[in-house]
Amino acid sequence: MTEHKLLVVGGRIQTLRKAAALGIRFVLIQHKDQFVPEAAELAEAVLIADYTDWDVTRPLVEAAHRAYGFTRVVSITEPGLVPAGRISDHLGLGNTTEEVAELLRDKHAMRRHLNASDSAEVRALSVACAEVGDAEALLAFGAEHGYPFVLKPVDATASLGVVRIDGPEQAAAAWEGVEALRSRTDLQWGSFFTIGRYLAEQYIEGPEYSVESFSFAGRHIVLSITEKLTGDGFVELGHALPARLDPADERRVEQAVSLFLDAMGLADGAAHTELRLSPAGPQIIESHNRMGGDRIFDLLDAAYGIDLEEWIVAWQFRLIPALTERPAARCAAATRFLSAAAGEVVEIAGADEARALDGVIDVETTVKPGDTVGELRGNWDRVGQVLATGPDTEAAVATAERLTEKVAVVTRTPAQTPKDRS
């Protein structure tokens, strides 16, 4: 029997468990801040290093390749995607290239690539953009392309630092926000992401969706289209799938994502693509060659029976068959996120009772008593989420929203008593 040998770059312990269960032997390269001791029991070897530093990573993976003979490399975590592409290129492993991974990571590079296409259909997926370095550049972009427009970090994730600018009077304050974010030292994943370059791009009108897809040797299959709830800003407050879309709009989204992935050069594996259904048609916000965050993969598993994380490692060795058409949903699933007023967490109420209700996938809280909750400025500032199923999307959403009413993260400021609720 041929041995399947894999290099895994970063990621979750769950990925490693699934690889081991498939009979895949693997080497893990992991950042010291993300290492879990169980990984050493599952892996052939574990390399502890900053895998985003090529000078450190290159000699380590070269030595591991000689010693363990892995033939494929994979990452499901945002900071590991470009390093995995570079490793594949360097060792000739045939995975997604560094160029493709970088195009999907760098939002400005993605826009430039689309806007320079010879295909009018591809160019129509994008909008005008420019890298900006000060408030004056924001004013210049607004004067040329109009308002509103969006200001976002080129390299960040989780809706961090994304703002909408509706007029020239907001430019100065928006750039002050950029400088404040750059100076923060408490950002989650701060070891991997530097808030540096900023991009201005035309605002896309219309409802927002994300698309989970999987590419099988160049054939792109949309697995599900997900509704996104963002409220008045860009922080994601919930997701639901399958999206409640007119069949004609659903086909337009599916065709747009396939066209986009072809244009970006992605041939294999998962992709998570965010777009808006604008009056001009589907237009891309951003995309990643990984599964979506916010536990969308758990919603996908509940509704479609697809373990996308398992698929990502299994497809490396063709341990799953290639799909030829979209799968059918067996039910619907939704998630809503928990929030709390800024302050010290003193109690989490109702979580155990909520978990026991019918249709509940999970109730997750990411804070505990004694933690401090700040203002909701990005996806990482949320304090938990609830996940639920239903016979259709409307029912799943309704269940998830009822769960948010049953679970309370209770906080207090120094002037309040412990019984004051958020």
Image (cartoon, rainbow, N blue to C red):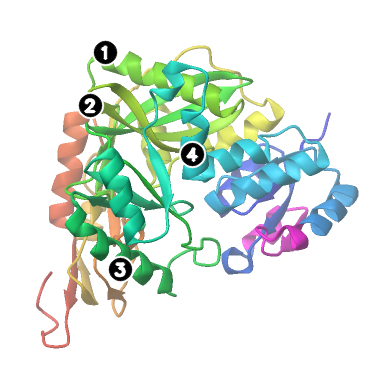
The image quadrant where one finds the N terminus is top right
Do the residues under discs 3 and 1 have CB atoms within 8 angstroms?
no
- Crowding at label 3, few (<14), some or many (≥20) Cα neighbours within 10 Å? few
- Residue 36: say if magenta: no
Q: Which residue is mark 1?
A: 247
Q: Which residue is mark 3?
A: 176
- Residue 6 visible in the current orientation: no
Q: Amino acid at mark 2?
A: Pro
SS class, disc 1: helix
Residue 355 in the image: state x and y as whole percent: 26, 52
Of 79 and 137, which appears nearest the observer?
137
Q: Earlier in the sequence, mark 4 or mark 1?
A: 1
Q: Is residue 302 left or right of residue 189?
A: left
Q: Earlier in the sequence, mark 3 or mark 4?
A: 3
Q: Amino acid at mark 3?
A: Glu
Residue 140 in the image: state x and y as whole percent: 32, 50
- Quadrant housing residue 411: bottom left
The image quadrant where one finds the C terminus is bottom left
Of 313 and 196, which appears nearest the observer?
196
Of 149 and 74, which appears nearest the observer?
149
Q: Which residue is mark 2?
A: 391
Residue 246 in the image: state x and y as whole percent: 22, 16
